[in-house]
Amino acid sequence: MTKVAAMQLGDARVLVEVGASGVRKELRMWRIEGNRAKLVQERQLSHAALAIESAVVGKTEVLVVVTEAGEWILLDSTGSPQLQGSIRLQGEKQPPASVSYATNTVWCLIAAFCSNAIHQFLLTVDRKGGFHLKTIAYRVTETHWPVALITHLAVVRGNTVDYAV
Amino acid sequence: MLCAAVRDQDQTFIYSFSLDELGREVVKGPYALRVAAPVLCLFSVYDQIIVATSRKLLVYGLTGELLELPTPSPVLCYLPYSDQCTRILLGTDKALHWLHVKDKAKQVTPATTVPLQFEDLLMLGSTNTGIVTIVLYSRETKSLVLRINLKSQEIAKVCEINTEKTELLDTFSQGNLTFGRVKQGNTQEIRLWSKCVQVLSTNSVVLEAADRVFAVEGDLWLLSSQQNSLSALYHLTKTCFQRSTAIPFLESESTLFLFTANSTHYQVSPSSIQICGLRGANKCVSFPFQVNTAAGFISLSGDFQVLISSKDRLYRGKDGKFVAETTSPIQAIEGMGGRLYVLCEHQKVEILRERQGNWEWERTWEAWGTIGMLNIGENLLFIGFNCIEIRKSDFSLQTYIPIPPCQVRKLSNSSLFLHSEAISALLDLNSLTILPFGDPILDAAISDSTIIVVDKAGMRAGERTINVKERVVAGELAGLSQDALAVLEKGKISLFPLPFTGDSNLSVAISTSDAITSILATHSEVLIVLNRLTLQLHSLSPAPSLLAHLSFPCPVLSVLSLVEGWLVVTFYEVWFLSPDLEEFGPRVHFETEMYQKLRMAQDQECVQELLGLGLAEKYEALQGVGVACPSGLPEKAEAVKVVITLTDLFVYISSWSQGAVTTKTQIVSCTYRN
C-alpha cells in the first residue's frame, strides 16, 4: 500500500511517497529542481505508513504522515521530523482499517478512521499542531456502520474544491 | 459540512454531517445516498458532492438531486485543484480529462494523452500566470512531471522521476547500521541505513557478478564466474562496502587459490603466482609446470611460505624452486608445527619435516576414507564423504562431526563452509552445529564475524547473520501460537506477544546455563530448548515454567514434534517422549550412529527411491528424513537412511563402496506410535 503526495514546501517542490515495501516501511522524497528530479531522502519508518497529506500547522507547511500504529509524524521539506504525535484509539488494539482526509476552516486536517466494527473515529489536527480524537460511535446505532468503513472524506464547499489553492 | 463515502459490505453510502470547533457533530447532514459502484474519488464544489466511480461521475446536490455523467474511461484519480473553480482535472488510463463544474451542464472533455499509465495525479505548484505543475505518479514505472498552461491548454513535460518500485530483498544489521539489498528494475544495489534512518546513498554499491568470495583482512575479493578471474575487490569497513579502485592482481588467468598472510596477497594461477604487498610491491613468478592440484602455505619461524604442487611434486611459491616429491599425486597441503602434511591419492598423508633447508620424509599415515584435509589451529581436519574427523598432530582422534555429502572449505579457525547442490551451511566447530543458510548460495566468507555470501544475484550478508565470536544464532524464530513469538537471540530466548503494538517489548526471557543451540515451538505451546547434551521443556501457559530438564548420553541432533509427543534424535538413538513426560525412553534404537540431522524438509532423492518401492502413500505424512551410518566408516560401509512419517519409521539401507552406492537395498519398517 503506497500513498503519495506532491507539494511546494517553502521554496522546494517535492514528491513524497510512503508505504510498506516488504519488511521495510519506507518513505522516499524527491526534490524537483528545474528539469531534474533527485532522490533526496529515503528513510525507514517504525511502522507502515497509511497516508500522507500536506497541511499548514501554525505558519509552517508540513507533511503529515500517519502510520498504522496511530503515529502522526510531521515532516519539513527536507523530510526531517518536526513534530511527532501519537494517538491510541481508545480500547482498541487494531490499527485503523482506513484513513482519509479533509480540511476545513477550523481544522487543518481531519482524518476519518474506522478502526474496527465498533466505532467510527474522527481525528483532527488543530492549527497549533494539537491532535484530537473524536469518537462518533452513536452513528453506529443509527445506521449500519458497525461493519462499514469510511473510504473517502471531503468537505462540502461552495465555490472551491477541496484543498483549493 | 463534511461528506463521507462509507463502504458497508458490498454497498457504498454517501453521508454528510457537520462538526463544530470541538469536533462535535452539530448538524446531521441530509440523507444517506446509496451508490451502486465502489467510490474512486470524492470531492465537492458549488455545494455539490461529486462522486467518481469507475464508469460515471455522480453529482449530488445538497437537496438530493442527482446528475449522472458518463466518463470515456474509468476514472483513476483527480487533481485536487480547480482552475478558477471552472474545471477539475481527472486522470484515466493514459489520459487526462477536464471535468467542467461551473456550468449547470457539467461535462467531461479530453485534455491530453500521456505516454504512461499512472495511479495518481498530484499538484506540485502553480503560478499567478495560470501555469500549474502536476505529477503523474506511477509506482510500477517512472513518474512524469508536466506543466500545464491553463490559458493556452499547452501541456509540456518537465522531467521524469524514477519512482519505480524498489524491492528489498534482504537486510542485515551491523552495529547501528542496516545494510539492505535493494532491487529496482534491473539494478541491484546494497544500500545502507543508519538507525536514525538517514540513507547514505553515496555508499550504495552495485553488485558484481561473482561466484566466489574471499574475506581476507577486511577485504572482500569477488571471483567472477564468467571469466573465472578476479573481478572485484571490496573493502568492508564498519560503515559500508566500498569498491576498491586499485585491484593489484592482473586478470589474465583463472585464479586457483587466494591466500593472504602477513599483509601480502598470493594469487595462484595455473602457471604463475602473483605476490602483492599492501604497499604496492608486486611480483609475478611464472612456473614451467602446470599447477593443477593443490596449494598450501606454511609458516616456519616467522618465515611464511606458499607451497604449490604439480602432480606429485612440491614447489616453493616465491621462486618455483623444487621442494620435495611424494609417492602419489598430491590432493592437499597443510603446514602445522614445523611439519608439512601432504594428503596424497590412495588416502595417505605423508609428513615432511624441514632439516637444514631441505624437506625430508618423516612418516606416512593411512587416512582411510579421507577426501580432503584442512588445518584448523593445532588440529588437522580430515574430510570424508559423511563426516569430518578432527585429529591432533599425532593423529589421535579428538572428535568427529557427521556432515552431509558436500564440499568443505575453511572460513575461519572456528567455522567451515559446507556446500553442495542440496545444502549450503556453516559448520561451527565450537558448538559442532550445522547452521544452514536459507537459500542456495555459491560461496561464503567471514569478515569481522559477519558471514558474507554470494548467490547468483550477487553478494550479500545472509538473512541469518551469524556472529561467530559469540557463537550466537541471531534472530531465530519459532512461532508459538497466534499469541506469541519466541526469538533466540544472544544466548537467551525472548517471548514477544503478538500482534506487536507500538511499545511492545519482551515479556519473558528464558535463559539457560548452557549455550542454546536451537529452539522449537510445539503444538501444545511447549517450548523446547536444545543444548548439546540436554533438552529443556518450558511450558508457556499460564506462566513460563520449566517442565523438564533431560540429559542425554550423546549429543542431541534434533527434535521432531509429532501429533502425540516428540521424537528426540541423538547420535545413537531415537527417543520418544509423550506429552505427559511419563513415556520416555528409547522407543527406537539403532545399532548405528546418526550421521545427519533429521530434516523436516523432504529429501527428494529419498522420496523418489521410496516411491519406486511402492511406499508413496506413506510419504503423504512425511515428517523427516535423515541419514545414519554404522560406526567405523571406511572402505565398505553401510549408509542408512531414516524416513519418518506420522506413524511409521523406515530404515533404508544402502551399501557404500568408496562413495559409490551399490544395489544392495533393505527396508526396515516399524511403527512408533500406538
Image (cartoon, grey):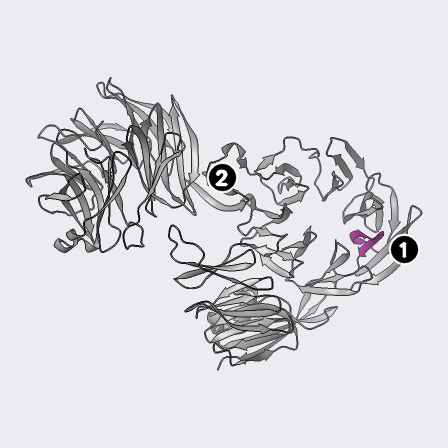
Q: Is residue B576 left or right of residue A4?
A: right
Q: Give percent across and percent down for residue B20.
A: 15, 40
Q: Is residue B497 left or right of residue A158?
A: right
| Disc 2 element | strand
Q: Residue at x 52, y 32 (%)?
A: B202
Callout in the foreground (2, 1): 2
Residue range (magenta): B328-346
Q: Give percent across and percent down for residue B305.
A: 82, 43
The amino acid type of the residue labelled 2 equals Trp
- On the same chain: label 2 and label 1? yes
Cα distance, mark 2 to mark 1? 56 Å
Instruction: Tell which of B500 and B75 is nearer to you.
Output: B500
Q: Residue at x 15, y 51 (%)?
A: A139
Question: Chain under label 1?
Answer: B
Question: Chain under label 2?
Answer: B
Magenta span has B334? yes
Vertical placement of residue B461 versus B563, above or below: above
Q: Is residue B349 left or right of residue A81?
A: right
Name the disc covering residue B193, or none: 2
First in residue order: circle 2 vs circle 1: 2
Name the disc covering residue B361, or none: 1
The quarter of the picture where residue B264 lies is top right
Q: Give percent across and percent down for residue A133.
A: 24, 45
